[in-house]
Amino acid sequence: MLVLAADHLIKDVAGFADSVDRAAELAREGYLVTFGIEPTAPETGFGYIEKGAALGSGFQVARFVEKPSVEKAEAFLSSGDYLWNSGMFCFSAGVLLDELERQAPEVHEAARVCWQQMREVKPLESGMLEIPAAPFAAVPSISIDYAVMEKSLKVAVVAASFDWSDVGSWSAVSGLIEADSDNNRAEGEAIFVDSRNTFIKSEGRLIAALGLDNLLIIDTPDALLVAHADKAQDVKHVVTELKSQNHPACSLRSTGVRPWGTYTVLEQESRYKIKRIEVWPGRSLSLQMHHHRSEHWVVVSGMAKVINGEQERFVGPNESTYIPAGCAHRLSNPGLVNLVLIEVQSGEYLEEDDIVRFQDDYGRHPA
């Protein structure tokens, strides 16, 4: 098994394939293999791996080191004995399960319960098995590094022979974008006046920077972040504060992805909410009902098949339909192109949990 992070950038595909081959050799010998990156700077935002005895195409791991201070990072860099911890792995499933049971038995048992309950449920139409929510919530929240890698004696590291960027901070993201003559970078529409060393990301509107230096400005439909570039690694503290306040920004986004497509909240006030809904070809929302809200649907593009109580009809572009509160309804896309519509909700309660599902193609309604 090759386990990769989704937010890493690797351009040297041939070098990556070579490193994977070397890792697979060690995995076949029974090692849990991680990929180490040769440090190029005393980076304090990465964890480190100390190389131990040589193992053919890699090294035994002597120890894992948490994100260090600048002084320790400089010492690691000069010693030549340390690699950046990429968080990517190669191992056989059997070896990982054995080590998980040995090093973190409570995690192993909780995962086993999840797997057992998954096997008892009929697969979705896609053939996929869905993890039951309740037993999954009972699995201890711990990283694989803490649970297994830092304890096991079967861990090896391969020094990566490919370029690598952990796009894990806004400074790293900005480094992927070409700079202007004042070292400003922008993703989206932005202008810089008398500004230097500043990165702007805009997802929907023009942002003007005037007289700024060394700032990060990240503007999304959900939130706006303004930070000094030297604090790029501390965004996690903002998240921690939001979680302590139980702020909805931690769990809800303006755009949500569902098995049938996506929805985006365009505007919301106390008694109305406006959404853009996109349904992929051949997909259907559940047959559902809402207690506290009614809905108006206006089709922008594509063709909608609508079940509204006892009625069934097709709604095309520039046509609309009305779903009263308490009425069972269903939206489907019978066509070959994406269905896009605007939904206007009105009522005394507009949250996503006001939903009763009667039928569902994606296993979200119990049999």
Image (cartoon, grey):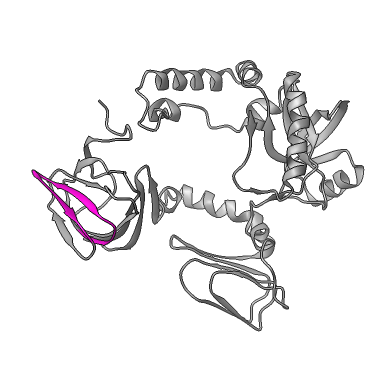
Q: Which residue is at the far bottom?
A: 194
Whole-percent x and y of residue 37? 78, 43
Q: From the image, give the main secondary structure of the stretch colored magenta.
A: strand
Residue at point 29%, 50% (across, down): 335
Whole-percent x and y of residue 262? 37, 51
Q: Is residue 27 left or right of residue 207?
A: right
User: Which of the two residues, 284 or 145, is positioned nearer the viewer here?
Assistant: 284
Q: Which residue is at the far right?
A: 79
Whole-percent x and y of residue 296? 18, 59
Q: Is residue 125 left or right of residue 206?
A: left
Tell me, yes or no, whether the highlighted magenta stretch contains residue 260: no
Residue at point 34%, 59% (across, down): 265
**Quadrant of the image for the N terminus?**
top right
The answer to which quarter of the image holds residue 2 is: top right
Looking at the rendering, the stretch of residues picked out in magenta corresponds to 297-316
**Res. 318 visible in picture:** yes
Number of numbered callouts drawn? 0
**Res. 65 visible in picture:** no
User: Which of the two residues, 20 or 158, is positioned nearer the viewer here?
Assistant: 20
**Quadrant of the image for the C terminus?**
top left
Residue at point 72%, 22% (across, down): 152
Whole-percent x and y of residue 279? 32, 50
